[in-house]
Image (cartoon, rainbow, N blue to C red):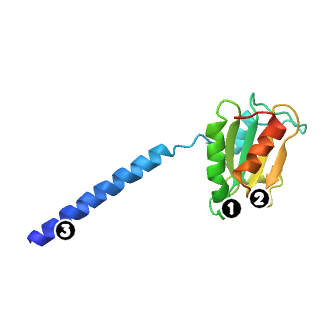
Amino acid sequence: MKTLLIIFLVGLQFSIFSQTTTSNSSSSSVSNIEHLTTNTFKQKIFDYSKSQTWSYKGKLPAIIDFYADWCRPCKIIAPHLEAISKEYKGKLNVYKVNTDKEQELAQVFGIQSIPAVLFIPVNGQPQMLIGAHPKEEYEKQIKTLFKISK
């Protein structure tokens, strides 16, 4: 009986420790990246149902990551984009679009391969970068297209 009580208490302590560790790590990894739906895309980025001519609605340049939860390369670049969203905070916006949930958006942009990262300057045409790339490549695009640095 004493042994069962000790096993129970050790298990309880481990359970409490695991919950604390999990909640601490998840609170430190709060994302700065907004997930766009078709409606929020039309409100914040471009309403393609009202105009065929590109006209960005944002005040800051933007990056949109078209991804899917099951996509391994998408998971590889996610930390790069998260870091960029923090490092360039106030200078650009980073968004995500889940292509499984927002199939209309994926179709409008002709997304056939993911990850697909759309770079949107305040003025000018957006440009797409397909595939997983090192963080430095995304930063190169930011400097080239947006003319901004950290």
Seen in the picture, residue 145 relative to 99 is either above or below; the reply is: above
Seen in the picture, residue 134 relative to 48 is either above or below; the reply is: below
Q: Quadrant of residue 16?
A: bottom left
Could you tell me how far apart the alpha carbons at marks 1 and 3 are, in whole angstroms?
A: 42 Å
Secondary structure under the numbered disc 3 in the rendered image: helix
Pick whichever, 105 or 17, lies toward us. Answer: 17
* Quarter of the figure that contains the C terminus: top right
Residues at circles 2 and 1 in contact by the CB criterion of under 8 Å: yes
Question: How many residues crowd mark 2 within 10 Å: few (<14), some (14–19), many (20+)?
Answer: few
Q: Which residue is mark 2?
A: 131
Q: Which residue is mark 1?
A: 73
Secondary structure under the numbered disc 1 in the rendered image: helix
Question: How many residues crowd mark 1 within 10 Å: few (<14), some (14–19), many (20+)?
Answer: some
> Percent from the top left, x then y, of residue 115?
73, 57
Q: Label 1 amino acid?
A: Pro
Could you tell which of marks 2 and 1 lies nearer the N-terminus?
1
Q: Quadrant of residue 62?
A: top right
| Residue at the farthest right position | 53
Could you tell me how far apart the alpha carbons at marks 2 and 1 are, in whole angstroms?
A: 7 Å
> Percent from the top left, x then y, of residue 17?
31, 55
Could you tell me how far apart the alpha carbons at marks 3 and 2 are, in whole angstroms?
A: 49 Å
Q: Label 3 amino acid?
A: Ile
Seen in the picture, residue 132 relative to 125 is either above or below; the reply is: below
Q: Is residue 95 left or right of residue 16?
A: right
Q: Which residue is mark 3?
A: 7
Question: How many residues crowd mark 3 within 10 Å: few (<14), some (14–19), many (20+)?
Answer: few
- Residue at 85% from the left image edge and 31% from the top image edge: 123
Q: Label 2 amino acid?
A: Gly
Pick whichever, 115 or 144, lies toward us. Answer: 144
